[in-house]
Structure formats: structure tokens, C-alpha cells
Amino acid sequence: MSVRIVDVREVTKPISSPIRNAYIDFTKMTSSLVAVVTDVVRDGRRVVGYGFNSNGRYGQGGLIRERFAPRLLEADPKSLLDATGDNLDPDKVWSTLMSNEKPGGHGERSVAVGTIDMAVWDAVAKIAGKPLFRLLAERHGVSANPRVFVYAAGGYYYPGKDLGALRKEMRGYLDRGYNVVKMKIGGAPLTEDRERIEAVLKEIGSSAQLAVDANGRFDLETAIAYARCCGSIHCSGTRRPATRSTMRCRPPWLNSIPGRWRPARTCSATRMRAT
């Protein structure tokens, strides 16, 4: 069997949402959706690998259509195959995409190449007839665990979104079975964010943990102020001074982090999980 990429399709779509985090809003944000079309047929359907670039980074349709997709389609199909000749080799595909590119200074091109790379891996797994996580585990000689830790990310700022709406959103995640939720902070004054954190903690109670995400917004002074604030929030939502007793517990997984990277103390009172 010979595998061939017959087309690479990209479409740039607007996210068009008024939500925002501490740094950006999504009203004019776009995302690239890519389909890598092969000539392989599985279960009566042509194998197509799909990829998309994460929000927070704009769509890269220009780069994909003008530079990277043409390189892939113009390459000798055999140069993109693995040793068996029965599947694509993502590393060879990546090398082809990056041909004639200056090393370093990747900038936006890493988003474009990464989106195609995601679609290629999706196609490779489909051709192999295996879930991608299992295929990757086999390639790297590790055990594939079908269970993985996940959390629900939300809590974005939104026009007119009050504390009640924020609590309802977080309750919805718990109702779906999540036991860790994440919310955005840093896009409002500290006093307002403190009220938002307290509201969520009241809503989730002891049934879940809360993580917060400032999207790299804080300078040192602001980060320290937020840390002190979080250390003074009791899980019931009432504030109390941060003491050694309120910060006494470390989650077990923290012990696996090298000491020089490990936070000096973790606040169990707020049940905020390091992310």
C-alpha cells in the first residue's frame, strides 16, 4: 500500500466571542482549521486528518496556503513515508514543511506548522487504526494509560456576567463530572477578582478544587498581592490571615517537582491547584 497526501485544506474562522481573559478579548480572534486529505480508505471512508490552532493565537491561513501546504503537496510522496511505506512519517512531513526556512525565530510560523502537524498525526493514527495516544505510547516505549487528568477551563470575563452567572457556570462543570475547575483572573481589579474567587469557592464547596489563570499578566508586585490575597481566603469564602496552619498541606504530586522549582508553600485553604 502506498500512502499519499492528495490535498491540504485550510479555512480561517472567526471565534467572534466577547469573552476575554487578562490579556486579550476574542471579538476579532480567528482560528485556522486544517484538513490533511490522504488517498487511504478505512471502513469505506477516505482518511482525513484534522487540526486546529489554539485560541489566543490568530489563524495562519496565509502562511499555510502560501508556503507550507504547497511544499507538502509538491514533495515526492515516497519521501513522506515511514520505513514500512504503509503510513506517513510525521517527522519527515515536518522536515518538509520546514525546508528552506531559516532556523530559529519561529514566530507565527510555528502555529501554522503545528496545525498541519496535528492533522498529520490524526491521519497517521487513523491509518494505523489506533487511538493516537496509544500509537504515541508504543512509539516511545511507554505504557498507554487510557485515563488522564482533566479539568474544566472557563470563568472568562464577559459583558454583564455577574457573580451569579459565574457560579452557575462552575456548577455546570461540576454537574458534568469535573472535580477541578479553572477561572480567569487578572482582568479586573484585585478586589473584584477576590469576590469572584470567593463566589466560586462557595459554589463548589468541598466537592471540587479551584485553579486560577492570569495568562502571564502580572508583574512581580501584582503577583505577590494576589498570592497574599489567595492565602487569606478561607474555603468557606470568609477571609482570614494566611498562617502556616492554613497553608500546611501539599498535594502529593508536588513532591515530584524538583525542589528549586517547587513553590515554598501551597494554600490548601483556597484549594487552588498549581497549573
Image (cartoon, rainbow, N blue to C red):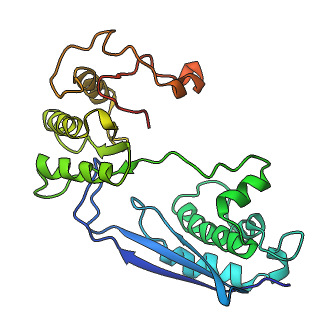
Q: Nearer the viewer, residue 58 or 194?
A: 194
Examine the image and state in which quarter residue 100 appears.
bottom right
Q: Quadrant of the N terminus?
A: bottom right
x%, y% of residue 45?
Answer: 64, 88
7 sits to left or right of 174? right
In the image, what residue occupies the spot 23% across and 45% down?
187
138 sits to left or right of 235? right
Position above or below: 58 against 142:
below
x%, y% of residue 39?
Answer: 72, 88
Q: Nearer the viewer, residue 86 or 174?
A: 174
Q: Nearer the viewer, residue 274 or 220?
A: 274
x%, y% of residue 183?
Answer: 30, 45
In the image, what residue occupies the spot 34% across and 38% down?
208
Whether residue 76 appears in this view of the structure is no
Position above or below: 275 against 34:
above
In the image, what residue occupies the spot 80% across and 48% down?
141
In the image, what residue occupies the spot 64% across and 54% down?
104
Position above or below: 18 against 258:
below
| Residue farthest to the top, as pictured | 244
